[in-house]
Amino acid sequence: MNEPSPPLAGRREWIGLAVLLLPLLLVSMDVSVLYFAVPFISADLAPSATQQLWIFDIYGFVLAGLLITMGALGDRIGRRRLLMIGAAAFGLTSAAAAYAGSAEALIATRALLGIGGATLMPSTLALIRNMFHDARQRATAIAIWTAALTFGVALGPILSGLLLEHFWWGSVFLINVPFMLLLVVLAPLLVPESRRVAGGRFDLIGAALSLAAVLPVIWGVKEFAARGDGRLAGAAIVAGLAVGAVFLHRQRTSPDPMIDLALFRGRAFSGAVAVNMLAMFALIGFAIFTTQLLQTVWGMSPLEAALWSLVPSLGVGAVTPIAAGLAQRGVPRGRLVAGGFLIALAGFAAMTAVAADSPLWTLMVCAALYACGLVVVLSLSTELILWAAPPERAGSASALSETASEFGGALGMAVLGSIGTAVFRAHLDVPAGLPAEAADTARETLAGAAVVASGTPGPVGEALFASARTAFMSGLHAAAIAAAVLMVLAAALAMRTLRGGEPDRVTATAGYSPEPAGAEPGWPAGSVPSPGPGPAVGEAAQDTTAAV
């Protein structure tokens, strides 16, 4: 008996995709939207140095720690329902953050924003998995999703800068409210509900273990990247890994686990998660070098640097749909992913030739090369992760993909940042006659050396800044070489693990059938709603909300 062909998405699904991009853009922008707001927040709320760090970091920590939990929760109660709950929470806490009257209140609301963000990100990707049944259309949708995620991070500082020219610092949060309201109104009309047909109790202990495992590891990696002190950071990482081992044991023995560990036995799934993490390692880990090059070495204002950082994103928006089209024309995804890593390799190799006095276009070309190559990898690996997971586990698979991305980005900042810092310190020549305290500050970072140089008049200050620029470029080149070596290894990994893992028009919608028992008419198996005009009115037969 032949499998029925999956239905093609129509206008309603594509408009629904545009609706799903709203929370994705805002959640990704909130990672970077505070870049320009810090001086205004400091003047108004007077946070301590520690509080200022927590204002920045708490959002990302909570977001990363809850992705797995929220992905599993969406599978049970409904991904659209969780999306709308998250949108309402994100909008309300954005308004609260905008009017926070103290540093403590702002830290608390940023943590709540992280909870809301964790509900939104896996829900958007899981809903795409269940809205687009045809593999070709799904690949295009995921490519658009990946490009929007990348674009949102780059857009955050620009939006922040524009708002702060005309409004108070709370406006960078308040702008979220109308978009979240729009999502709450439009999602029921354009985005169909989907959830697991089979029920099961939600594992609250597993959720707590997941949070307790992810948070210390992410914090430890970022702490090591920021301060270079491995003792406390190492202890946090070891503690997180120990809790992670307990979490994995619970997932192996639980009758209804949050994560189906059997997925990792499949070479396509585990390989796609690995290459996804490696791509984010290089993309996020190297971003700090390009930012410092634009602002500190070349003297651009933050807004000007943020605007130039959008240039590589334009190439990303064009390349990702092309890669998806090539995959659907029969080019093996393993080769395309390996090709993306090799394009990134060319970009990182070319970065070793960029000098402090190079023209701006050279950096733009290099950054566009490695960004386009790595985003191609992210798009295709995300598609493979969702294809390899059964539809009823789409939320959990999405959360795994995004958690791997968070780990990869944090590791990239720690490892590549440490390489760059070590080389910078080894090559920095501190002029004689500089006070010991100022010399120690100059040796810490390029920014510290620039501050000391600007406060030191005459030839000594000029010599220090010239040496700092040269030392920084040496560190940048070392990090680029490390990233290039990683790209070679990642390309080999992709060719080995992704070989033969190819979704097609039928198998990519595993188990598709037009009328499953116990579902509303028109609902495919796995509680995937059928496309068509008007809002979805049915839900899966077995409601698991009472078990939560």
Image: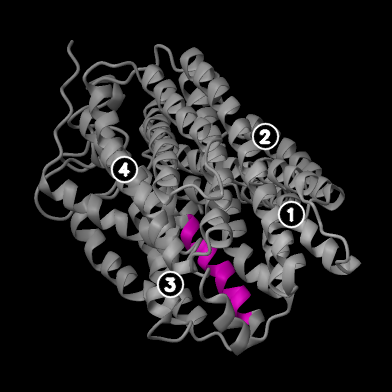
- Tell me the SS state at disc 1: helix
Sequence-wise, the earlier of marks 4 and 1 is: 1
* The magenta segment: 105-118
Q: Quadrant of the N terminus?
A: top left
Please tell me the numbered disc located at residue 315: 4
Q: Which residue, given by chain and number where applicable, does mark 3 sit on?
A: 160
- Tell me the SS state at disc 2: helix
Of discs 4 and 1, which sits in the foreground? 4
Could you tell me residue 475's position as x and y percent?
67, 43
Q: Which residue, given by chain and number where applicable, does mark 2 sit on?
A: 248
Q: Which residue, given by chain and number where applicable, does mark 1 sit on?
A: 223
The residues bearing labels 4 and 1 have C-alpha atoms spaced at a distance of 33 Å
Of discs 1 and 2, which sits in the foreground? 1
Please tell me the numbered disc located at residue 488: none
The amino acid sitting under disc 1 is: Glu
Sequence-wise, the earlier of marks 1 and 2 is: 1
**Residue toward you, 60 or 265:** 60
Q: Is residue 243 visible?
A: yes
